[in-house]
Amino acid sequence: MEFFVFVCAALMILVGAVGVITRSHPVHAALSLVLTLFGVAVLFVAQDAHFLAAVQVIVYAGAIVVLFLFVIMLLGVDRVENLRTEPLTSQRPLAIIVSLGLIGVLVAAFVRGSDALHERGEGINIPDLTTGTDANTTQLAESIFSQYVVAFEVTSVLLVIAVVGTVLLARRTKTVVAENPK
Amino acid sequence: MIALDTLLIDKILWTPLLIVLLKVVVVFVIGLLATMLMVWFERKAIAGMQNRIGPNKTGPFGILQTLADGIKLFFKEDLIPNRADRFVFVLAPFLSFVPAFLAFAIIPLGGDFRNGNAGEVTWFGQVTKVQLADPPIGVLFALAISSIAVYGIMLAGWSSGSKYPLLGSVRASAQMVSYEAALGLSLASVLLISGTLSTSGIVSAQSKITNWHFFSTGILPFIIFLIAATAELNRPPFDLVEAEQELVGGFNTEYSSIRFALFYLAEFMNTVTMSALIVTLFFGGPQPIAFGDFVFDIPLIPNALEGTIWLLAKVLVFLYIYIWFRATLPRLRYDQLMDLGWKVLIPAALGWFMLLASQRLARQNDWNIILVTTSAVVVMVGCYLLLQAAFSQSARQRETQGPMF
């Protein structure tokens, strides 16, 4: 049963991921991304990480991709992109270098952590019915708000800085009042 | 692996499997029937409020009007516009319809929650709950589903390949994403008081009328939740998604036949689900009305069935309130909608949540609760003044420099 769930979820993830890259239409690519995110959520549920699965759907599928789509629709870039024109000439070689580096990092991480694939580490205890249905959420909250509270706060500060920076960048400073005030 | 239903924990046997299948079918049928009756109820109640008669030809009191409309829509020609993105255009109604039914699965539909019972009933020798699924994440499932429902509306508007539906869907997605924050924050107050995410756990925590989260969270979270839920449902006065005067018809302009019917169905199904969710979260769901030791007990009916009756009665009140909203409140302007969501509801929900959290911390650590509450209120007033200063500053800048974006 678990194997069956894994195969289905893995297929969803792979099909979605391939779709994100190969679909030339931005909206279709974003929808493929949703498929991938759902596959990951299914895998979380299969691993009894229900809270993570819910957050995955609420935050990623429900907010972030919706914002992607929102921007795509609002800016009217929902046309098929012509891939021959190149706005930044050094873009492709750079992309190849960066993706090779990413593959290297991922492979290194897998090699380093390969022993964790065989046996379960000392991570968060998997809740069962004896510990109550909320054990999962409680444990996550405890580790976020006590053990990793500094990292958590720093991350939130980082997000606030990003938001403020975006507003500042997007803001047009108008020193001259419009000629025909309404 | 934690099963969503206590029946499915050990080896899967035939009887539990059949019970679960039966529950799936029953919940689906209840959903369809509730939607059908809701459409009729809305038309009839609004007709009453506007001094009209409303549907009265098909069946007694016109109750079969929705069925007739559905059959008519089913046999109409199914059009796909030339400029539409065919795949997404066909997919969108289902993306809207399926979440509407999924969310209904976590609502406790009955059962005996009195005296600390967990709402479990025994059917054919098997102990189960009168709800389709009781996932450990409970209410978060409803939030996740409601965030998925955005896709249906958004993609419907976009894939039509036409301007007005696109405008409608862009409005919808902005509105739903912004009000989801207020919805989640007001929900957090309930979760803080009940201490669990599971819907049946939340219902069990509300055994007496004073324990109803409507009172124990201090009414404000309920008001915020009700407003945000109305906006999330795109119902009047927040129905800018389908403002006829501005957008012809909204995101579903290009849809016809059964696809249009699916959107319509999803909209009303969502209303029913949201009312049931409000009742579950704030008004004790299937719990009877009880003060102290006194319980309003309906005689002769077993307690488990009585839960269903109470739930139905409470849900009907909220369905009526939604209809009432529609008949009495004028539609908001778009900037008013966004101002209400971001500048009023979200700060208020966040502040109230912090107040409740500080009180809970004080109670746990035996601090002086009056002192803690007073200082929390002082901090909140300070934050409110800062926020107002920021708003007035930005208003002044807008006057001198013109709009920023």
Image: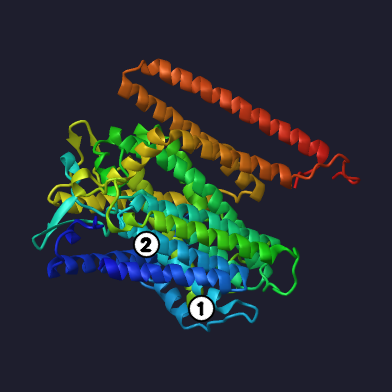
Task: Give how far across and how far down residue B372 sits, in percent.
Answer: 42, 19
Residue linked to disc 1: B257
| Badge 1: chain ID | B
Residue drawn at point x = 66 percent, y = 62 percent:
A94
The quadrant where residue B366 appears: top left
| Badge 2: chain ID | A
The kind of residue on which mark 1 rests is: Ser
Eye-nearest disc, 2 or 1: 2
- When the figure is inspected, residue B15 is found, relative to residue B214, above or below; the finding is below
The quadrant where residue B22 appears: bottom left
Q: Residues within 10 Å of mark 2 (few under 14, many from 20)?
A: many
Residue linked to disc 2: A42
Considering depth in this image, is A22 or B313 the residue closer to the camera?
A22
Q: Secondary structure at mark 2?
A: helix
Task: Give how far across and how far down residue B139 sits, in percent.
Answer: 36, 49
Considering depth in this image, is B101 or B359 the residue closer to the camera?
B359
Task: Give how far across and how far down residue B291 sits, in percent.
Answer: 24, 33
- When the figure is inspected, residue A107 is found, relative to residue B383, above or below; the finding is below
The kind of residue on which mark 2 rests is: Val
Q: Is residue A83 visible?
A: yes
- When the figure is inspected, residue B120 is found, relative to residue A2, above or below; the finding is above
Residue drawn at point x = 59 percent, y = 39 percent:
A160
Mark 2 to mark 1 CA distance (whole Å): 34 Å
Q: Secondary structure at mark 1?
A: helix
The quadrant where residue A114 appears: bottom left
